[in-house]
Image (cartoon, helix red, strand yellow):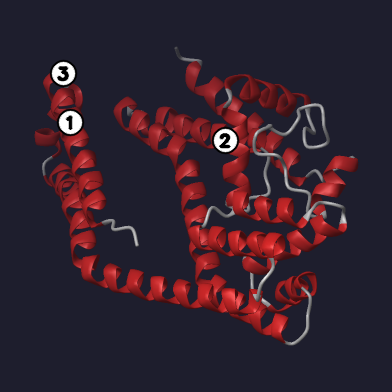
Amino acid sequence: MEFLPALTAGGAVFLLFLSIQTILAGPVGVDARLRQYGHAPDPRAVRSSDGATSKTIVTGHIDRALKRRGVGNRLALQLERADVHMTPSEFVMVTAVLVGGVAAVSLIILRNPAFGLIATAMAFYAPRFWLWRKRQKRLKTFNDQLADAIALLANSLRSGYSLPQALELLSRDARPPLAQEFSRVNREVNLGLSPTDAMANVLNRVPSDDLDLFITAINIQREVGGNLAEVLDAIADTIRDRIKLLGEVRVLTAQQSYAGYVVTLLPVVLAAAMFLISRSYMIVLFTTLIGWIMLSVASVGIIAGFFVMRKIVKIRV
């Protein structure tokens, strides 16, 4: 057991350097070069460990393990939606480095197994939480830009532009992430993909109800014809009204939402303050069986209460 902290620290350092080398290595191979020009990876198939994205033997084994367990497909899709330029194996390696580093620090420096267990669990979920936040932020930014982009597209069609020309103009004049997605649409169409499939790839990367409405209108117009500019104007007005209503709902529920954060953090802050004031009084919770049971029950109650309050104030528009 005396060698466990040293082995943990050594493994964390090894994974750190290995992950840095893997991330910094440039993509090679025809598939990887084509992917840079807009070819979206199939979310139903994890990136092949025999292809160009698997740059080391370790990442190849990790890719195969993720594929066997069905985790790599979902993780690749989440990375794609968050616009994080990493493979699933690289993300897993970064998570392993973070968990190993936190565990090593807890065991070697702090020498507190209880705190180490909690910190290690937080380190395990921190990259996932970061990925979720990045994905939600990108989706919100895309939805906020979509109404103006559709209006610009409608005006371009009235000016005599064709739909591909209007999409190219939109990719040049818009801001990221909307410009990035429609630039990929243009590149995919230029590489031979049908416009319908290119639009479906955008919807797969950006799961937005407003974007789904926009793509459905374009697909219907391609099948039956009609004045697409008028349809797009109506869609843009609908999206603006929806965003306005959603903003009003958020204002009305802001107090309850922040109350949920306060009620959740209050026991944690109070426990930390009591631990600093009277360490001998609070240490019983971390050194006895009944203390562990009380902490577990309290933690489950706090987390459950937080999600219940979030569910109450979350109103879909």
Name the residue furthest front: 224
Taking the image as shown, residue 133 lies to the left or right of residue 183, namely left
Image quarter of residue 168: bottom right
Q: Is residue 242 above or below residue 271?
A: below
Q: Is residue 292 above or below residue 270?
A: above
- Please name the residue that numbered disc 1 is placed on: 295
- Please name the residue that numbered disc 2 is placed on: 74
Regarding residue 303, the answer to whether it shows in the image is yes
Mark linked to residue 289? 3
Residue 73 location (% of width, % of height): 62, 33
Regarding residue 13, the answer to whether it shows in the image is no
Question: Which one is earlier in the sequence, the residue at label 1 or at label 2?
Answer: 2
Q: In this orientation, which residue lies closer to the viewer: 8 or 60?
A: 60
Q: CA distance from mark 3 to mark 2?
A: 39 Å
Residue 39 location (% of width, % of height): 78, 49
What residue sits 24% from the left and 67% below the top?
254
